[in-house]
Image (cartoon, rainbow, N blue to C red):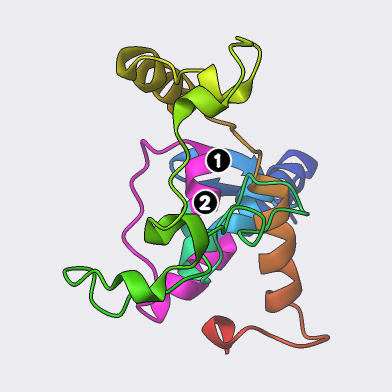
Amino acid sequence: MLSPSLVSDMVSRADTRMVKGQKTSSDSALAKMGRGYKNLSSKGITNNLNSNVSDNDFAADLLSTLGCSVSTESKEFTLLSQQTDTQEIQNENILDPSLFKGDMAGENIVATDKFSNDTSDPFFTLDESPETTLSQQAKQASTIKIIDLQDLTATIIDINLSNTGTTLKQFK
């Protein structure tokens, strides 16, 4: 006959898993990611797990294994609004003025004295110094958005390890 303490100990062990050297609940996001990692690792799809990596980095690595990447741009982001070059130069080492239209061909050169001396005119607005521009770019680059990926990754893995619905090719 099993003692009640032995039964409760066995039940509590069944409800926990070891992932990255940590005991965690079987229903936690980390445990689901651990099951997904074990599945992908057995197929040789994912890299070896470093137990020192954060849980969020672990989730990002699993997403990367599945071919997903995280984008921090807005949903409406498009490169089309930033694309201003409408002319194509076949060989940038050969400049053919006939390919250019209007003022760019040098036909209608506008002298600066044609502009008013109004300093609010954009023509007279100078760019920032290179040092200022570089420091602003460095500041923007150092601002990193950290997105919690654990729940998303756990949900993707849970769906793919279930017997219902479709499955990603990595889990087949």
Q: Residues within 10 Å of mark 1 (few under 14, many from 20)?
A: some
How packed is label 2: few (under 14 Cα within 10 Å), some, or many (20 or more)?
A: many
Left or right of 103 on screen, residue 72: right
Nearer to the camera, 22 or 60: 60
Q: Residue at x 46, y 18 (%)?
A: 126
Left or right: residue 109 versus residue 125 is left
Task: Point out residue 170 in the picture as x, y percentages from the top left corner.
Answer: 53, 82
Question: Is mark 1 in CB contact (under 8 Å) with mark 2?
Answer: yes
Q: Which amino acid lies under the numbered mark 2 shown in the image of this protein? A: Ala
Three-letter code, disc 1 = Asn
Question: Residue 60: which disc?
Answer: 2
Query: Does 27 lie within the magenta span?
Result: no
- Is residue 99 at all visible to an observer of this figure? yes
As helix, strand or loop, the secondary structure at mark 1 comes to: helix
Q: Is 58 inside the magenta-drawn segment?
A: yes
The magenta span reads: 35-60
